Amino acid sequence: MEILLFIAVGALFAVGTYMLLTRSILKVIVGILFLSHGAHLLILSMSGLNADSPPLEHMGDGNFSDPLPQALILTAIVISFGLTAFLVVIGYRTYKEHQTDDLEKLRGSADE
């Protein structure tokens, strides 16, 4: 099961990196989303998957999984949601101002 998660992490990082290298602002934002989801899945898979263990100590017989990675992932999800909302607003304002989402054209319009 863990090898499947590692393959999914690699695929998310690969797709995210590819989308970061495109010319569209929207694709860059989606690439950042893929990278953040890949990081969340990487943290979860590196903490170890204990399907037989409950998440809290009092629910089992002394063998429980560590809740810290889950708390870190929850915090990271909230932060990435805020970052995504901010980037969408910045991308929308840039499109409204310059009437393009092409990064090469935006780089050329700064010189004019």
Image: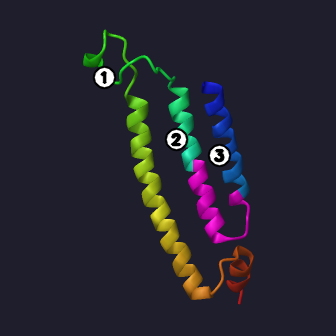
Q: Nearer the viewer, mark 2 or mark 1?
A: 1
Distance (Cα) linking label 2 and label 3: 11 Å
Q: Residue at x 60, y 25 (%)?
A: 1
Q: Which residue is mark 2?
A: 40
Percent x, y of residue 91: 56, 74
Mark 2 neighbour class, 10 Å CA radius: few under 14, some 14 to 19, many 20 or more: some
The magenta stretch is 19-35
Q: Position of residue 59 (x, y in %)?
A: 27, 18
Q: Residue at x 73, y 81 (%)?
A: 105
Q: Is residue 30 left or right of residue 102?
A: left
Which secondary structure class fits the magenta region best?
Answer: helix
Q: Residue 62: where, in percent of width, then height?
A: 32, 10
> Helix or strand or loop: what does disc 3 sit on?
helix
Quadrant for the C terminus, please. bottom right
Which numbered disc, 1 or 3, marks the residue that appears first in the sequence? 3
- Tag of residue 12: 3
Name the outermost residue toward the top: 61
The amino acid type found where label 1 is placed reads Leu
Q: Are marks 2 and 1 in contact (CB under 8 Å)?
A: no
In-image side of 68 versus 3 (left or right): left
Q: Position of residue 74 (x, y in %)?
A: 40, 42
- Residue on which disc 1 sits: 56
Question: In the drawing, what numbered circle is on residue 99?
Answer: none
Q: Residue at x 44, y 56 (%)?
A: 81
